[in-house]
Image (cartoon, rainbow, N blue to C red):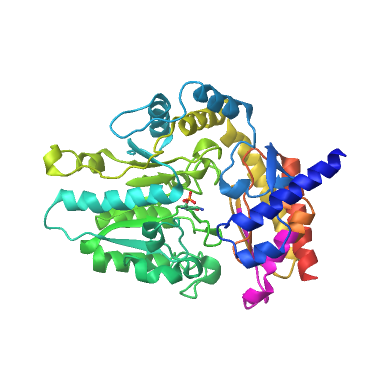
């Protein structure tokens, strides 16, 4: 009887979902023809659908969840805040959790980042950095012409027009070209498919010359250089060669170009350190944060910057140096209190320390994937993993798009109780930091079996 009502409810929800919801980054013709997966509950590394089936959350509910679902401390922090106030604005006034969180963020951020500007998603965190960088130069001197941005191919910074303008993935961004502002695009350090035909490390990271050349020629008109530090996520989990980020920082300083590090995906422990910038001891001029900031519970973002940038915006009201930007839910108290609870867990449970053996275990498990002939390259930094599947291993030939290999692997994994989402034919694994070794073993085994099953 109970089973029947569960089934009826699931069917009803599926019907309404397919009738009413337009899903993001989803071909809806395709979506309508497949059974829906509708999540109603979660616990730890698992999420449960409306049929009562539990799945291992192999992508942290799109790269956001950090300490697992339904963490008592974060749930409590939200409930406590609800009992006080759920929202009040930051425009001209303040709120308690936003202040306390700013204090904590500045403490853990790379040196020099001492000002916190809140917004509510990764794309807006990037927009804020771009607008601030542009306005900084405008207000620093009347004579400079610094209004362009340098960005990397394969870069991804969100879906609003400004963040798409600095994006570098043709598949997602190509159609909007007529709407975008012009940027200077530089090849990314994608060693597996090096645009210079070189091999790391003997190349000496020659692609840095491309970046330097662009800065040398255009620095007088360049306001900033935006990049995802260490790992280009949506571009295919592309891991930078060691030294690239540090040298990029030096070039920015040398050519007076502001460095914008988009840590939306890499931040909050994902790469094995709190922020990816720490791997090469880099302090950018802007750091964009979102996703994991609240432990992946609620939408929140922050753009951190330096005293120097901040001071260029100070003046009399009539000077018009104000930063005219702010969203309705900027610095939302519920989200900020969730973020405080998440940072407290990082501290109390020494999350970054306990993560290290898991990262090593994952590296060991991933080596097995090279037994599969279609595995071209395995890229890993911390708990961020991309397994690139190719039709021809020797020539690195991709599978035809219509073969939909990545998509098929995802469906196979789902049958086996694991949720993943590919980037084309790059299989992405990005579990919560709280995943156990046993769960990691299951995750890799299921993905291994799913790839084999699709390609056999
Ligand atoms: N920057 C990076 C590096 C991202 O990975 C993403 C989202 N995947 C964004 C920005 C955009 O974040 P949001 O989807 O919250 O707007």
> Which range is magenta?
385-411
**Percent position of residue 431, x then y:** 64, 46
**The image quarter in which residue 368 lies:** bottom right
**Percent position of residue 54, x then y:** 76, 44
Relative to residue 29, is residue 114 depicted above or below? above
Who's the residue at 33% across and 49% down the image?
129
Instruction: Give 10 or 63, whichever is nearer the viewer.
Output: 10
Residue 51 visible in rendering: no
Going by the image, does 251 lie left or right of 187? left
> Which quadrant holds the C terminus?
bottom right
Residue 293 visible in rendering: yes
**Percent position of residue 396, x then y:** 62, 75
Going by the image, does 59 lie left or right of 92? right
Relative to residue 316, is residue 383 depicted above or below? below
The question of residue 455 being in magenta is answered with: no
Which residue appears farthest toward the right when viewing the image?
A: 1
Instruction: Give 415 or 13, whichever is nearer the viewer.
Output: 13
> Which quadrant holds the N terminus?
top right
The question of residue 400 being in magenta is answered with: yes
**Percent position of residue 213, x then y:** 31, 68
Who's the residue at 63% across and 42% down the image?
432
Who's the residue at 39% across and 38% down the image?
330
Count of marks, rendered view = 0
Instruction: Give 134 or 110, whichever is nearer the viewer.
Output: 134
């Amino acid at each position: 009887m109970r089973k029947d009502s569960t089934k009826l409810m699931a069917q009803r929800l599926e019907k309404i979902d397919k009738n009413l919801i337009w899903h993001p980054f989803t071909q809806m013709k395709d979506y309508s023809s497949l059974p829906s997966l509708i999540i109603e509950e979660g616990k730890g590394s698992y999420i449960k659908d409306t049929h009562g089936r539990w799945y291992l959350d192999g992508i942290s509910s799109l790269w956001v969840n950090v300490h697992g679902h339904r963490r008592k401390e974060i749930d409590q922090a939200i409930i406590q805040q609800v009992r006080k106030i759920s929202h009040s604005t930051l425009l001209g006034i303040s709120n308690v959790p936003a202040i306390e969180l700013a204090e904590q963020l500045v403490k853990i951020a790379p040196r020099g980042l001492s000002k916190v500007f809140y917004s509510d998603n990764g794309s807006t965190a990037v927009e804020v950095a771009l607008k601030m960088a542009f306005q900084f130069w405008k207000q620093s001197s009347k004579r400079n012409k610094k209004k362009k941005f340098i960005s990397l191919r394969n870069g991804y910074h969100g879906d609003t027009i400004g963040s798409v303008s600095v994006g570098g993935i043709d598949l997602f961004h190509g159609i909007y070209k007529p709407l975008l502002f012009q940027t200077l695009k530089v090849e990314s350090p994608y060693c597996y498919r090096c645009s210079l035909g070189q091999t790391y490390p003997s190349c000496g990271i020659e692609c840095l010359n491309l970046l330097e050349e662009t800065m040398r020629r255009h620095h007088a008109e360049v306001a900033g250089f935006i990049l995802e530090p260490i790992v280009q996520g949506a571009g295919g989990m592309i891991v930078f060669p060691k030294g690239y980020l540090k040298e990029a920082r030096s070039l920015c300083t040398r050519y007076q170009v502001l460095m914008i590090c988009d840590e939306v995906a890499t931040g909050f422990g994902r790469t094995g350190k709190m922020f990816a910038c720490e791997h090469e001891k880099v302090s950018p001029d802007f750091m964009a944060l979102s996703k994991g900031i609240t432990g992946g519970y609620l939408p929140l973002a922050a753009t951190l910057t330096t005293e120097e940038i901040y001071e260029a915006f100070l003046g009399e009201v009539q000077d018009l140096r104000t930063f005219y930007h702010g969203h309705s839910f900027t610095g939302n108290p519920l989200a900020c209190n969730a973020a405080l609870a998440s940072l407290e867990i990082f501290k109390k449970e020494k999350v970054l320390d306990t993560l290290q053996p898991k990262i090593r275990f994952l590296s060991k498990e991933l080596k097995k994937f090279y037994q599969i002939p279609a595995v071209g390259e395995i890229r890993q930094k911390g708990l961020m993993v991309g397994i690139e599947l190719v039709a021809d291993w020797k020539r690195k030939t991709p599978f035809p798009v219509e073969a939909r290999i990545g998509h098929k692997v995802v469906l196979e994994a789902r049958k086996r109780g694991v949720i993943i989402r590919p980037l084309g034919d790059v299989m992405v694994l990005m579990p919560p930091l709280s995943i156990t070794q046993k769960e990691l073993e299951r995750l890799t085994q299921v993905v291994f079996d799913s790839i084999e099953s699709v390609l056999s």
